Image (tube, coloured by chain):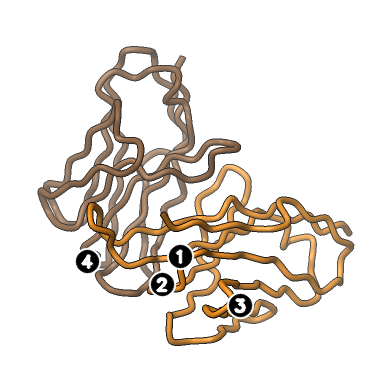
């Protein structure tokens, strides 16, 4: 089975801190995605990547950046965490073509 | 812009009941449809994947159908159990748009509660 592993289930960070959320997939998928999920707003795409060192903005990229130095790893970076970035963050991966997405178990981030 | 709508937003049923969750979409040019389950505070678990050329998929007590002509998909759960309580999301993979690659578009989800 494809596995997408997010390094932390729960994180608590202070306002202004630099935060790294890590995601690793083990099935050689080309595509990787970061979403955030908030009550009443559903899942919103932050950034995605189709290849190593490539990145594209999703619907809500402001306040975030990403890094993909290796095919299996996709990192989401909050340069200066703010309270409005408190959310559930979900990583996903997929192959090119019409196959499905596989999601990680999520990271619940609280910024205080 | 593609839109995906799920109804109802919430559903509560007694154990053993058969039930149907609905999902509608506005653009029939899809690559595939995926149904996910999400337990509180957890990630998304893929339940069923239907390719554009297929009409339905089955896994155990679950059956998902796709009707592109009417812009609808349904998830049928037979003999529901309390362990089925979760939020169910449908998601469509549409072809790339001019300014973005192919991306998954989600419905808002249906929160299902199965009462013992």
Residue in front for this viewpoint, A91 or B3: B3
Q: CA distance from mark 3 to mark 2?
A: 16 Å
Classed neighbour count for the residue bearing mark 1: other residues with Cα under 10 Å, few (<14), some (14–19), many (≥20): many
Subunit bearing disc 2: B
Subunit bearing disc 4: A
Left or right of A24 in this view: A43: right
Of all chains in the rendering, the one displayed in brown is A
Left or right of A86 in this view: B78: right
- Of the two numbered discs 2 and 1 on the same chain, state the one appearing first in sequence: 2
Q: CA distance from mark 4 to mark 2?
A: 24 Å
Determine whether the residue tagged by mark 4 lies in a helix, strand or loop.
Answer: loop
Determine whether the residue tagged by mark 2 lies in a helix, strand or loop.
Answer: loop
- The residue shown at (19%, 57%) is A50
The reply to whether label 4 and label 1 mark residues of one chain is: no
- Of the two numbered discs 3 and 1 on the same chain, state the one appearing first in sequence: 3
Residue A107 versus residue B20 in the image, above or below: above
The reply to whether label 2 and label 1 mark residues of one chain is: yes
- Labels 3 and 2 touching (C-beta < 8 A): no
Q: CA distance from mark 3 to mark 4?
A: 28 Å
- The residue shown at (79%, 55%) is B11
Residue in front for this viewpoint, A95 or B71: B71
Residue in front for this viewpoint, B40 or B28: B28
Specify the label residue A28 is tagged with. 4
Of all chains in the rendering, the one displayed in orange is B
Determine whether the residue tagged by mark 1 lies in a helix, strand or loop.
Answer: strand
Q: CA distance from mark 3 to mark 1?
A: 13 Å
Specify the label residue B92 is tagged with. 1
Q: CA distance from mark 2 to mark 1?
A: 7 Å
- Labels 2 and 1 touching (C-beta < 8 A): yes
Q: Which residue is mark 2?
A: B30
């Amino acid at each position: 089975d494809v596995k997408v592993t997010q390094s932390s289930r729960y994180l608590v960070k202070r306002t202004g801190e630099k935060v790294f959320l890590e995601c690793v997939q083990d099935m050689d998928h080309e595509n990787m995605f970061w979403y955030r999920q908030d009550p009443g707003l559903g899942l919103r795409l932050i950034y995605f990547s189709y290849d190593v060192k490539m990145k594209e903005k999703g619907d809500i990229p402001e306040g975030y950046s990403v890094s993909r130095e290796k095919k299996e790893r996709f990192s989401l970076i909050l340069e200066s965490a703010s309270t409005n970035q408190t959310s559930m963050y979900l990583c996903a991966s997929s192959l090119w073509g019409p196959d499905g997405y596989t999601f990680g178990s999520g990271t619940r981030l609280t910024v205080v | 812009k593609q839109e995906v709508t799920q109804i109802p937003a919430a559903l509560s049923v007694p154990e053993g009941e058969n039930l149907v969750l609905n999902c509608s979409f506005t653009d029939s040019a899809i690559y595939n449809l995926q149904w996910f389950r999400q337990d509180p505070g957890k990630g998304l678990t893929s339940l069923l994947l239907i390719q554009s050329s297929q009409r339905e998929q089955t896994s155990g007590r679950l059956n998902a159908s796709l009707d592109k002509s009417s812009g609808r998909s349904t998830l049928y759960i037979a003999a529901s159990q309390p362990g089925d309580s979760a939020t169910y999301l449908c998601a469509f993979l549409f072809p790339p748009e001019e300014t973005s690659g192919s991306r998954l578009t989600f419905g808002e989800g249906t929160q299902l509660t199965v009462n013992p």
